[in-house]
Image (cartoon, rainbow, N blue to C red):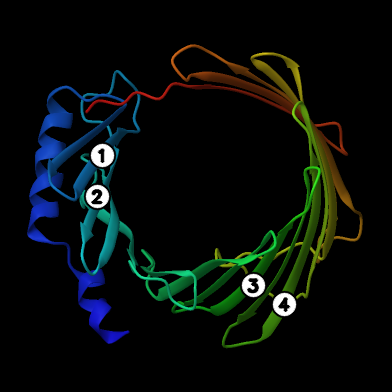
Amino acid sequence: MPSLLPLLHRLPAALLVGLAAAHTAAQADPPNRAVMDPAPGVQLSYERQGPLDTPTPPGRFDGTIATPAGILRTTVRASPNEEQRFQRGDTTFELPSPVLDGQLQVREREAGGLGATWRARLGAGLAADAQGERTPIRSGEALQLQQQFTDGNAARAQVSSSRTAAAQGRRWDLEVTHATSSARWSAGIDASERSYVSSSGGLEPRAGVRLGTQWLVLPNTRMEARYTRHVRWDTEEPLSSVMLGTRFDLPRRASLVTGVEVDGESRHKASATLIVPLEER
């Protein structure tokens, strides 16, 4: 698809101007998140990522341009205190017309290389997701099939492969879920060859199993429990952990999420996250 590559290597002038304007406004009075539409088909958003008392906090800009040829999306990170103040992230281009009855998206990765994703609904509750990427350190493909059954049952299967200059490997993942109006249960297994390399460059566990459940205890409160156990290639003993969490839905679409995780060596990790979506238009 050579005709799309120039779009992935430079941003339209309108988007650059909009990002500069958004950055100026953000420095003057930065909200946690702001969204604006400077022109038809153009949307820009800014998200403040630094502490509230930081005079020049880092931030993230997301830009979208809808054209007859497709939809272009890009991300720019602003770091005012670093030598390189702006760093461009991934850039994606989504074709407007179906390809083989599915949606095709082309992506230029921040670290270099290209990727493509194709998603389609095949009928009778079956959906497919195929991905491929080429980077300076690896190339890989993945195929995922998800089947929705009646009565809230679903199954998902995924197979992935990777190739590097040294070796090639594969990874498998299978998960089944059952959901009702007030609860959800899931169980999954995964395994990988030692030579498989993930997109982040890390080594995947040799084999693992996971169990999880969520249930509604009050109209605005959900409980969650998760158990994982896996064996790594660099250790002989299996590693396991248990997580218990609670999610409280608050007014104005905010939520409070708390959790405690304990591993096999009795090490504890607690977390509390307040999610407050702030949006200005």
Q: Secondary structure at mark 1?
A: strand
Residue 268 visible, this orientation: no
Per the rendering, the mark at residue 45 is 1
CB atoms of marks 2 and 4 within 8 Å? no
Per the rendering, the mark at residue 26 is none
The residue indicated by pointer 3 is 143
Q: Considering only order in the chain, which callout, 2 or 1, is on the residue closer to the N terminus?
A: 1
CB atoms of marks 4 and 1 within 8 Å? no
Q: Secondary structure at mark 3?
A: strand
CB atoms of marks 1 and 2 within 8 Å? yes
Q: Considering only order in the chain, which callout, 1 or 4, is on the residue closer to the N terminus?
A: 1
- Quarter of the picture containing the N terminus is bottom left
The amino acid sitting under disc 3 is Leu
Disc 1/disc 3 C-alpha distance (Å):
32 Å
Q: Is residue 115 above or below residue 255?
A: below
Disc 1/disc 2 C-alpha distance (Å):
7 Å
The amino acid sitting under disc 4 is Arg
The residue indicated by pointer 4 is 170
